[in-house]
């Protein structure tokens, strides 16, 4: 409409002049009759054009009004969805805090467990060594238990916390721990030429991270170039490692269920970690690694429907 403004303005000015100074009737001088014929011819060619232009403008205005109404409706729906999401996050945070309170009340040794694993992390030179030291420490702790009642309580807790489905039988049943775009699969060459031992998922800022499996937290905290690292013992010699988180909300020794929130991603990429060195992406990146008896394995068969890409 803006591009046609000048042409339409000139046309309207011309029509107004014809209206103020119309041509004489045909009964006048032959010269006047010629002017009348010319004017009629001019009007005959202009009127259809004006009608077509007016129809096109009405159509454009109607389309614009529809677009505006649709945008307004979508804005309202977005506000409703955001309010619902914030409410759900608030409820989830309350549930997480409540569980933490229960865990702290019923498991007074969590602080000791966390300090113990932090000490192991300082001594370990790599993940392989860290997992080995954790396993050895568990064996030493088991040998120190002489009280039969304590052993019975541990057995009872083990029965309660036993995974609903054995990890080896859960292939094709696990959900990815975060929504995002998959950057690297297992055993691919990364940007520095190294072979990946897990998968990399670029997430949105502060994305929720959940545990993909039932299990027990064996380590939660900073570990060398991995940054914030979470190790979940899934049983049968399997471990699930999640790295690159901005915040971890669970503690060492805590029992987890698949789908339970364990932390959040940060606002930006974790530049100080090994993940940033291997993936050139400005978004927060979650690293997922599966291990069996301490050795990395391909996690692809475990994801639901054997998905090769993360959810967009």
Image: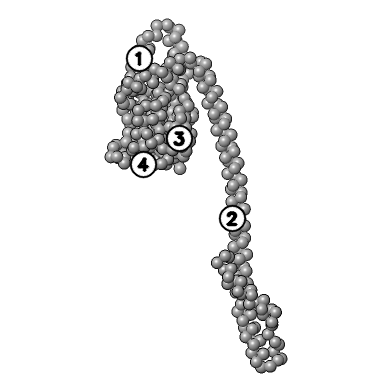
**Image quadrant containing the C terminus:** top left
How busy is the neighbourhood of tag 2: few (under 14 within 10 Å), some, or many (20 plus)? Answer: few
Q: Where does residue 145 sit, x and y in percent of width and height? A: 39, 9
Tell me, yes or no, if residue 167 can be seen here: no
- Give the number of the disc on residue 280: 4
10 shown above or below 311:
below
Residue at (61, 71) in percent of width and height: 9
Q: Left of 108 or right of it: where is 140?
A: left
Residue receiving disc 3: 266
Label 3 or label 2, whichever lies nearer to me, is: 3
Secondary structure of the residue carrying numbered label 1:
helix
| N-terminal label among 2 and 4 | 2
Residue receiving disc 1: 139
**Image quadrant containing the N terminus:** bottom right
Residue at (47, 32) in percent of width and height: 264
Q: Where does residue 253 sit, x and y in percent of width and height? A: 44, 20
What's the distance in space between the residues labelled 1 and 3, CA to CA?
A: 36 Å
Q: From this viewpoint, which residue is outermost toward the top?
A: 147
Q: Quadrant of residue 151?
A: top left
Residue receiving disc 2: 67
| N-terminal label among 1 and 3 | 1
Q: Left of 5 or right of it: where is 244?
A: left
Q: Where does residue 232 sit, x and y in percent of width and height? A: 41, 25
Secondary structure of the residue carrying numbered label 4:
loop
How busy is the neighbourhood of tag 1: few (under 14 within 10 Å), some, or many (20 plus)? Answer: few
| N-terminal label among 2 and 1 | 2
Q: Where does residue 290 sit, x and y in percent of width and height? A: 36, 30
Q: Are marks 1 and 3 in contact (CB under 8 Å)?
A: no
């Amino acid at each position: 409409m803006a591009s046609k403004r000048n042409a339409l303005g000139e046309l309207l000015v011309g029509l107004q002049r014809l209206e103020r100074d119309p041509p004489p009737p045909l009964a006048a001088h032959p010269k006047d009759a010629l002017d009348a014929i010319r004017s009629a011819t001019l009007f005959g060619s202009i009127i259809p054009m004006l009608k077509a232009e007016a129809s096109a403008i009405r159509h454009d205005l109607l389309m614009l009004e529809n677009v505006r109404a649709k945008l307004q409706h979508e804005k309202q729906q977005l506000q409703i969805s955001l309010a619902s999401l914030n409410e759900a996050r608030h409820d989830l945070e309350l549930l997480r805090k409540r569980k933490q309170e229960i865990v702290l009340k019923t498991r007074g040794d969590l602080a000791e467990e966390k300090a113990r694993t932090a000490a192991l992390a300082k001594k370990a030179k790599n993940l392989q060594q860290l997992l080995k030291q954790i396993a050895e420490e568990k064996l030493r702790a088991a040998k120190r238990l002489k009280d039969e009642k304590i052993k019975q309580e541990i057995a009872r807790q083990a029965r309660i916390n036993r995974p609903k489905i054995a990890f080896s039988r859960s292939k094709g049943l696990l959900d990815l721990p975060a929504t995002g775009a998959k950057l690297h699969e297992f055993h691919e060459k990364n940007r520095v030429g190294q072979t990946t031992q897990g998968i990399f998922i670029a997430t949105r800022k502060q994305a929720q991270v959940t545990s993909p499996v039932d299990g027990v937290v064996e380590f939660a905290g900073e570990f060398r170039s991995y940054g914030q690292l979470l190790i979940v013992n899934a049983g049968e010699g399997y471990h699930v490692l999640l790295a690159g988180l901005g915040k971890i909300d669970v503690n060492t020794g805590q029992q987890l269920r698949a789908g339970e929130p364990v932390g959040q991603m940060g606002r930006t990429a974790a530049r100080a970690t090994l993940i940033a060195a291997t993936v050139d992406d400005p978004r927060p990146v979650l690293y997922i690694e599966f291990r069996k008896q301490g050795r990395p394995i391909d996690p692809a068969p475990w994801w639901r429907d054997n998905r090769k890409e993360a959810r967009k």
